[in-house]
Amino acid sequence: MIKVQPNVVIISDGNTRRYKNNMVQGGFDWLVNFIVSNSGAVLTHIAIGDNANPVSQGDVVLHNELTRKTISLLENDNGTAYAEVFVDMNEANFHWREIGLFAGGTAEKDSGTLIARCLVDEAKDSRRTATISWEIGFANV
């Protein structure tokens, strides 16, 4: 068995915060389909919302998506996948409670397949920027 370990790292104002989370069922289905058929949508977006409802395996969208960013960096570094977005001073200025990783999405809210959803506690305002980096690592169980 292989264990999938996604983490979210948020860097803002020189501070780094790590949030552990789990893939939702859509993420597992996406990964299995990719392995079996070598097809499927690539990771495209990270979305941010303000709802702190607990993460459920059955989540298919964020509970209240307010902002969506196209992934600007997608790379493999020693067996860990990284998806990253930069949030400028004038973007996403609200209290972040949830972040979602999407495959095959567009700029449209709730589009694509939700791979993972993470609960966070970040107060973003117009005085700072933030970098969100989603790490997906694999380990033998």
Image: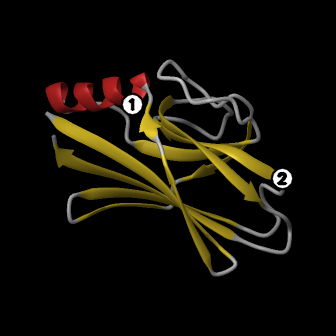
Which label was assigned to residue 40? none
Q: Quadrant of the N terminus?
A: top left
Instruction: Name the N-terminal-most of marks 2 and 1.
Output: 1
Question: For this rendering, which residue is in front, 9 or 113?
Answer: 9
Report whether 6 appears left or right of 98: left
Q: Is residue 26 above or below residue 12?
A: above
Is disc 2 in contact with disc 1, using a CB cutoff of under 8 Å?
no
Q: Number of labelled discs?
A: 2
Task: Say which residue appears at 25% left-offset and 25% top-offset.
Answer: 33
Q: Residues within 10 Å of mark 2 (few under 14, many from 20)?
A: some
Residue type at the position of mark 1? Gly
Q: Where is residue 29 drawn, in percent x and y?
A: 32, 23
Alpha carbon separation for disc pair 2 and 1: 27 Å
Toward the front, the furthest residue is 141
Q: Is residue 2 above or below residue 91?
A: above
Q: Quadrant of the C terminus?
A: top left
> Which residue carries the number 2 mark?
94
Res 128 quadrant in image: bottom right
Toward the top, the furthest residue is 58
Report whether 121 appears left or right of 8: right
Task: Say which residue appears at 33% left-offset and 28% top-offset.
Answer: 28
> Which residue carries the number 1 mark?
27
Q: Secondary structure at mark 2?
A: loop
Q: Is residue 8 above or below residue 12?
A: above
Residue type at the position of mark 2? Phe
Q: Is residue 5 above or below residue 10?
A: above
Task: Say which residue appears at 39% left-offset and 30% top-offset.
Answer: 27
Q: Where is residue 64 drawn, in percent x and y?
A: 74, 32
Res 54 quadrant in image: top right
Task: Say which residue appears at 79% left-offset and 61% top-offset.
Answer: 124
Q: Residues within 10 Å of mark 1 (few under 14, many from 20)?
A: many
